[in-house]
Image (cartoon, rainbow, N blue to C red):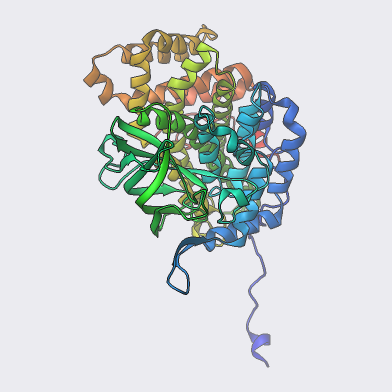
């Protein structure tokens, strides 16, 4: 008798879950489709549907896995010892950047400004971020830099390159390129979020022409291979914002030296660096002495993208968890058929839809720059949303990984990457405490406008006592002494976001979904982990809406 006759074979793929692939990220997302139409971007649906299909292909997802397993590498010198500061990426990086550029995610909010422009871009962002999040960083920075650069007299020379839809990742002078990217350099090792601790210096260059010479360093230099960066440095007027190109007009490399690439927890397909400025040339952007304010304006756009990026990760984590639960059995029946698992998944689906509708609502507010009420809403709600949605996504990603069990902890699958990616949006562009204090700062500078925002969120729901109580709580919190406000800032930001999400869902979602959200989020009966509620959520309907079976 042979060994094969005596030993039973292990069953192949027994109770294992098939990969989620070859689906349309747009058509399968009811909350996204409804939000696109509601917020004024319905004319873009054909393009969004096509992009959703492209992103959902098996080969696209496999490529995303590869570019995150084989991250960028720094080559500071060539074989002759000449300084080149080159960063080599996985070939798939250019594919994802090319996809983002073809959709105009780096420029369309400005090149085709008008009703629905930010919303259509946001929808692309929400889908792209579910598949490959690292390529969003340079896309975000470029888009956020455009409105600042557009005010400069020399913007016309950059416009064709910034608005081009073909990605050109070659490390060459701009005269030889078809398009360009712009990064940002703010934080330093001794300062972090305290930008006034920056020590980089800028002095007027002997060459004149409005150029400055920069010296110093940056601890985090976003997208170091971008064709230019907006950099914070001290000058004779205080703090200035400076446009620092990677290559100079004479074809020489500018004095920006990459010291090393950061070895990050997540966001591994994208390069982040430490750099030193060695007499680097830069041009002032914005008013003299107002560099911090100029770059904070840029950060407002990047913070919206942090909300979008987290909502994207949350959506993908929930879809993967529901897909897994429907195909995996335990204790004699599918996971998705078990009441407690349905409760957890429904709670996660509820969180995802609330994040999506809020992100699209904020994008819609950015589409109305001249509307004072919309300006007030985005000024107070954007930092609150960045705080809350990014924080909730970190927790949700861990919960969705747990649905997969040990399989979720293995790097071969998607959950580990989603989990490692989740914290970045909470940390970058201002950590949680910075965001909550920014909410208070916005409210204190325009208290009447802040009051109108809060009152407006509750005004349409006079028969909702939990909504009215949340609004009263918020108005009371914003009227307290400064020290008390700061101590409770996280609670205030949380209440603001939950009130905004409740308002949106009560207005636009099915009654049963809005009821589940209001009762579980504003009712005070929910626990501090997903699925910990005293009564069952509308689990079957929520799961079917989140991910149609």
Residue pushed farthest front?
Answer: 207
> How many circles with numbers are drawn on the protein?
0
Q: Nearer the viewer, residue 189 or 264?
A: 189
Q: Is residue 392 left or right of residue 504?
A: left
Quadrant position of the N terminus in the picture: bottom right
| Residue 181 horizontal/vertical position (percent) | 55, 45
104 lies above or below 440: below
Residue at position x 33%, y 21% in the image: 441
Q: Height in image: 261 above or below 7?
A: above
107, 543: nearer the viewer: 107
Q: Position of residue 39 (x, y in %)?
A: 64, 22
Residue that extends furthest to the right in the rendered view of this protein = 46
Would residue 17 be visible to someone looking at this image?
Answer: no
Residue at horizontal 42%, vertical 71%?
A: 81
Quadrant in which residue 507 is drawn: top right
The furthest residue to the bottom: 1
Instruction: Residue at 67% x, 54% y: name it.
Output: 60
Quarter of the image that includes the C terminus: top right
Q: Is residue 360 visible?
A: yes
User: In x, y percent, where is residue 102?
Assistant: 69, 43
| Residue 133 image offset from top left, x and y in percent | 55, 47
Please name whichever residue, 137 or 275, is drawn nearer the observer in this view of the structure. Answer: 275
- Residue at image location 70% in from the left, 24% down from the top: 37
């Amino acid at each position: 008798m042979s060994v094969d006759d005596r030993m039973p074979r292990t069953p192949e793929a027994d109770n294992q879950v098939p990969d989620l692939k070859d689906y349309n990220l747009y058509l399968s997302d009811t909350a996204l489709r409804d939000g696109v139409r509601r917020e004024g971007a319905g004319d873009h649906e054909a393009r969004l549907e096509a992009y959703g299909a492209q992103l959902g292909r098996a080969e696209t997802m496999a490529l995303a896995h590869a570019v995150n397993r084989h991250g960028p590498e720094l080559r500071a010198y060539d074989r002759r010892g000449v300084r080149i500061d080159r960063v080599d990426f996985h070939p798939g990086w250019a594919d994802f950047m090319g996809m983002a550029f073809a959709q105009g995610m780096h420029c369309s909010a400005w090149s085709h400004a008008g009703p629905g422009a930010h919303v259509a871009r946001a929808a692309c962002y929400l889908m792209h971020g579910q598949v490959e999040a690292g390529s969003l960083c340079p896309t975000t920075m470029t888009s956020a830099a455009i409105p600042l650069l557009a005010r400069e007299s020399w913007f016309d020379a950059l416009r064709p390159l910034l608005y081009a839809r073909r990605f050109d990742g070659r490390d060459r002078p701009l005269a030889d390129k078809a398009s360009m990217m712009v990064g940002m350099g703010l934080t330093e090792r001794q300062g972090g979020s305290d930008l006034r601790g920056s020590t980089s210096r800028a002095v007027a260059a002997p060459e004149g022409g409005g150029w400055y010479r920069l010296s110093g360093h940056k601890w985090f230099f976003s997208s170091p291979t971008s064709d230019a960066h907006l950099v914070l440095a001290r000058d004779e007027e205080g703090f200035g914002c400076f446009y620092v190109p990677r290559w100079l007009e004479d074809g020489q490399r500018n004095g920006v030296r990459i010291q090393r690439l950061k070895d990050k927890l997540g966001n591994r397909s994208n390069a982040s660096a430490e750099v030193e400025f060695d007499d680097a040339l830069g041009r002032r952007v914005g008013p003299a002495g107002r560099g911090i304010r100029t770059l904070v304006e840029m950060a407002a756009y990047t913070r919206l993208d942090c909300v979008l990026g987290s909502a994207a990760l949350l959506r993908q984590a929930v879809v993967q968890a529901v897909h897994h639960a429907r195909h995996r059995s335990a204790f004699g029946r599918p996971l998705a058929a078990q009441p407690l698992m349905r409760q957890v998944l429904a709670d996660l689906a509820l969180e995802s839809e609330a994040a999506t509708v809020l992100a699209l609502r904020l994008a819609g507010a950015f589409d109305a720059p001249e509307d004072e009420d919309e300006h007030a809403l985005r000024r107070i709600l954007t930092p609150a949303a960045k705080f809350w949605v990014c924080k909730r996504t970190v927790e949700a990603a861990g919960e969705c990984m747990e649905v997969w069990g040990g399989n979720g902890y293995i790097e071969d699958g998607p959950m580990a990457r989603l989990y490692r990616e989740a914290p970045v949006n909470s940390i970058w562009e201002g950590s949680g405490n910075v965001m909550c204090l920014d909410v208070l700062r916005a409210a204190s500078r325009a208290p009447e406008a802040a009051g109108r925002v809060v009152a407006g969120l509750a005004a349409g729901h006079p028969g909702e006592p939990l909504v009215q109580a949340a609004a009263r709580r918020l108005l009371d919190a914003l009227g307290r002494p400064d020290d008390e406000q700061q101590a409770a800032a996280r609670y205030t930001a949380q209440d603001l976001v939950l009130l905004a999400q409740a308002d949106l869902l009560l207005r636009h979602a099915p009654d049963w979904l809005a009821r589940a959200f209001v009762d579980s989020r504003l009712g005070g009966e929910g626990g501090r982990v997903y699925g910990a509620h005293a009564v069952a959520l509308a689990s079957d309907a929520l799961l079917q809406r989140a991910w149609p079976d």
